[in-house]
Image (tube, rainbow, N blue to C red):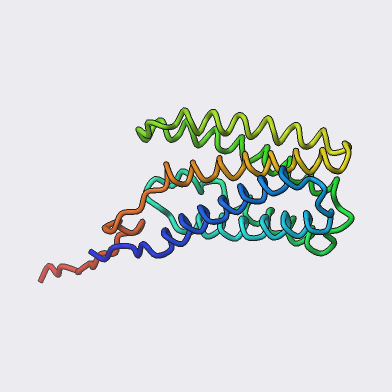
Amino acid sequence: MKTRSTAPMKIAKFGCIAVSAILCAAGIFFIAVPDISAKIIGIIVGSSMLAFGIMRIVGCLSKDLYRLAFQFDMEAGVLMMILGGIILINPKDLMSFICIVMGIAILIDGIFKIRISFDSRKFGIKSWWAILILAAVTAVIGTALIFDSAKGAEVLTVFLGISLLAEGLLNLYTVITTVRIIKNQQPDIIEAEYYEISDK
């Protein structure tokens, strides 16, 4: 029986790991350099959302063994691509919009990851509780970012950095612990040949 190619799964897994690492790096950068210009913040956030949206769609289509990490990512990926594109069109004057959008995206992702943590428990993944804790903390941070979007620029930049760092760590841990790639994974639809048996 023909097995499924692991290439899409590897692209999705390692692509999401790379983008999650970029989110963490951007978060640390914002925390360390809070007086950065709004235009650079917009470019970094918009590009990150666009890249993460693309990788989420790829992940959803890759159909890894457990299908936990990417199970809600088709719609979320499309939404992130659209919002990332909007931010990149005008990255300079959208600081409050950026924080609200990121807060909503991070809150939704945290809620989805809470669901994924319980599904992971059913699959016997021992570290499901760590995903749950990271998801809950990330959701709280996302909520706070939404309501704190009217603060001063530097304070807001630091808080945006904390949010990006939490989101990056959550996705990094979730992908590493729940995405399983095996070489002999069978396709969803088993192809079979049928023969008509004549009564004659």
Q: Residue furthest left?
A: 200
Q: Is residue 115 above or below residue 167?
A: above
Measuring 76% from the left and 36% from the top, which residue is drawn there? 145
Quadrant assignment, res 10: bottom left
Q: Residue 16 at what x, y percent from top left?
A: 52, 54
Q: Residue furthest front?
A: 32
Q: Is residue 167 found left or right of 117 in the rendered image?
A: right
Does residue 123 appear to the left or right of 50 in the view shown? left
Q: Quadrant of the N terminus?
A: bottom left
Asked if 145 appears above or below 195 in the picture, the reply is: above
- Report which quarter residue 102 is drawn in: top right
Is 171 in front, or is 108?
Answer: 171
Q: Residue at x 69, y 33 (%)?
A: 141
Where's residue 15, x and y in %? 51, 59
Please report the residue visible at 83 percent of the width from the left and 58 percent of the height from the top: 39
Residue at point 73% right, 47% down?
30
Q: Quadrant of the C terminus?
A: bottom left
User: Picture coordinates of residue 132 (x, y %)?
Assistant: 52, 30
Across the whole image, how many numbered discs are drawn on residues?
0
* Residue 19 located left or right of residue 174: right
